[in-house]
Amino acid sequence: MSLDSAPAEAGSPAGPVLAPGSTLGILGGGQLGRMIAVAAARLGLHVHVYCPDPLSPAFEVATAHTVAAYEDEAALQAFAAAVDVVTYEFENVPERTAAVLAAAVPVRPGPRSLAICQDRLSEKTFLSGLGIPVAAFAAVDSAEDLKAAAVRIGLPAVLKTRRMGYDGKGQTIIREGFDAGAAFAAIGAKPAILEAFVPFVLECSIVLARGLDGTVVPFDVAENRHEHHILKYTTVPATVSAATAAAAREIGTKVAAALGHVGTLAVELFLVRDADGERLVANEIAPRVHNSGHWTQDAAETCQFEQHVRAVAGWPLGRAGLIAPVEMENLIGDDAGRWSAILAEPGAHLHLYGKAEARPGRKMGHVNRLNPPPRG
Ligand code: AMP
């Protein structure tokens, strides 16, 4: 173990600080874990990845890995004993998994970031409690609840499962004349939330890091375009006013501070324009590195993965200014077959995740294009 104990004074880290040569444990072996591992290796840390999938992309770039279920307490204890701090690449870490690990080793971000962000109802309640605008919402536990919620909130509206939804999975739009039983069944008849449909003009996100000492360093606001419910393009600078960009940074900072978050975090936002001007409506918090922050690898002074590693290690964060305008394109399914042409593009930086099989909808890599030509 290579830990220097630091006193918990104001402005100094709250908890142990890692020394280079320590071991970072990562729960989850997908592309996010892989890119966290690469950033950690560059800073002289060892990395141990824990994931149930034996074909995890992150294993290839880690010092050690464990293939075991998240419920396997003996494997979790052995993992905790082998690492100096644990972080995660996904927010659906089971509560018991986090608790077993936290009994033995610091887990960063902490339990509040997980508990709030795993459940859309607690997330929306938390955001509105902070005075951050969100769509009108109501809990839905049955088809009857759905009928009542639709009357209260108005239509159209979006019905989403409270837990485990991503990339548009576990959600359906509710319109006039809807069949409540069929709609509730369509999302698997699970505890859900009904949200008013937000008539946004664009989607954006604020990605930031918060250090162990509470310092927050935001990146520039990113503008996001989805195709088939999956993020396809992120562009920076976003086409939002300076006041909106400042409001996004304020939202992100408030959220991170209220969670006591340590690490990188993203807040997904809708931009609404009406007669009164522009305003932001918060949709979702990701208490982790985020796809809409991948541009930072080539176009920010310090990337989101390095900031995350610095934060969870208890180290100072880097500056996060924009180096050049950038467009990130996700390479989904067969898109990654264009790798050779992308490598030949001036100003393009290719990132591939080492996944063997290119299934439809699967994120295979991404490309960051600096100073991109305007897209029509
Ligand atoms: P989510 O799983 O909450 O990130 O939602 C996935 C996508 O569905 C978002 O990126 C939006 O494009 C759309 N969406 C989700 N919630 C709403 C809403 N309340 N109003 C309008 N569109 C939404």
Image (cartoon, grey):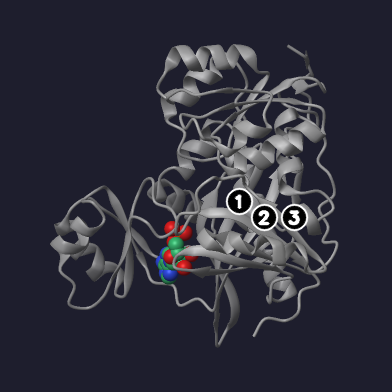
- The residue closer to the viewer here, 306 or 122, is 306
Task: Check contact, mark 2 vs mark 1: CB within 8 A.
Answer: yes
In the picture, the quarter occupied by the N terminus is top right
Mark 1: secondary structure: loop
Name the secondary structure under disc 3: helix
Tell me the kind of residue under disc 3.
Thr
Q: Position of residue 208 (x, y in %)?
A: 69, 50
> Residue under circle 2?
293
Of the residues shown, which amino acid type is indicated by label 2? Gly
Please name the residue shown 54% across and 45% down the image. Answer: 356
Q: Residue at horizontal 60%, vertical 49%?
A: 255
The reply to whether the C-beta atoms of the residues labelled 2 and 3 are less than 8 Å apart is yes
Pinpoint residue 125: horizontal percent, then vertical percent.
43, 51
Q: Tag 3: Cα neighbours inside 10 Å, few (<14), some, or many (≥20)? A: many
Front in this rendered view, residue 78 or 201: 78
Is label 2 in a helix, a strand or a loop? helix
Residue 85 vs 90, above or below: the answer is above
> Distance of mark 2 from mark 1, alpha carbons?
5 Å
Q: Is mark 1 within 8 Å of ligand 1?
A: no
Q: Is residue 235 visible?
A: yes
Q: CA distance from mark 2 to mark 3?
A: 6 Å
Q: Is residue 10 above or below residue 104?
A: below
Q: Earlier in the sequence, mark 3 or mark 1?
A: 1
In which quarter of the view is residue 222 placed?
bottom right
Residue located beneath label 3 in the image? 296
Q: Nearer the viewer, residue 107 or 362?
A: 362
State the image quarter where residue 261 is shown: top right
Q: Kindly identify which residue carries mark 1.
A: 290
Q: Is residue 233 above or below residue 77?
A: below
